[in-house]
Amino acid sequence: MPTNTNVLMIRHAEKPDDPGDTGLAIAGQERAQAYVIYFQNITIGPAPVRLNYLFAAADSAESQRPRLTIQPLSDAIGVSIDDKHSDKDYQKVADDILQHSKYDGSNILICWHHGEILQLAEALGVPASSLPAQWPGDVFGWLLELNFDADGTLTVQPISSQKLMYDDYGQTPPTA
């Protein structure tokens, strides 16, 4: 179990209407740029957060969106993106984080596909009862925050709306 570690989880940014387009819609590109400022100024409690690790689902023939969503942030803060695992291999990402002490005392951002992001959260130890039944396909602005304390005990914060983009308003996260 990681200790004194925060894991922030987001879904990739908005996708284009064209199902053959593996990139981001204009709104998604705007969100990716907005994340540069957002995640450089995010706090947990009163403490500012400096991201130490970035994870994204690997590019595939269907989507490059998770990586593209956090690439501008990666470039801005000088932290490379670990994007070697496919969206279905979320258990490998969870195992890596849970089993390696290099993540102790760190802040991690994970950008994943909405179809697997909740399973990834469960693989990290989040009880299913603390999560919605699904991450809606039209919701891009939710943030899931996991905190591992000094003993490795996990606390899950309620899903919050980033209220970063206009579309985020009215996309109220469920309460557990």
Image: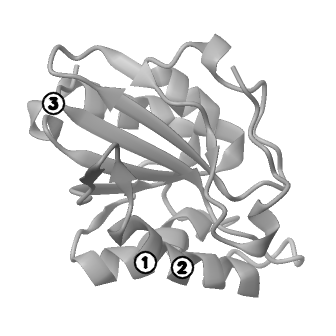
Q: Is residue 34 above or below residue 102?
A: below
The three-letter amino acid code for the residue at tag 2 is Ala
Residue sitting farthest toward the left: 102
Number of numbered labels in the structure image: 3
The residue wearing badge 3 is 100
Is any atom of residue 23 visible in this view?
no
SS for tag 1?
helix
17 left or right of 115 in image: right
Q: Which residue shows up at 28% across the image and 25% down it?
A: 148
The three-letter amino acid code for the residue at tag 3 is His
- Between marks 3 and 2, how big is the CA–CA gap? 31 Å
Q: Are marks 3 and 2 in contact (CB under 8 Å)?
A: no
Q: Are marks 2 and 1 in contact (CB under 8 Å)?
A: yes
79 left or right of 40 in image: left
Residue 89 is situated, as x and y percent measured from the top left of the image, at: 49, 37
The residue wearing badge 1 is 37
Residue 46 is situated, as x and y percent measured from the top left of the image, at: 29, 48
Q: Is residue 26 above or below residue 125?
A: below
The residue wearing badge 2 is 34
Q: Which residue shows up at 74% across the image and 81% down it?
A: 27
Q: Which residue shows up at 67% across the image and 58% down it?
A: 141
Q: Residues within 10 Å of mark 3 (few under 14, many from 20)?
A: few
- Res 16 → quadrant: bottom right
Q: Is residue 35 above or below residue 103?
A: below
SS for tag 2?
helix
Quarter placement of the N terminus: top left
- Between marks 2 and 1, how big is the CA–CA gap? 6 Å
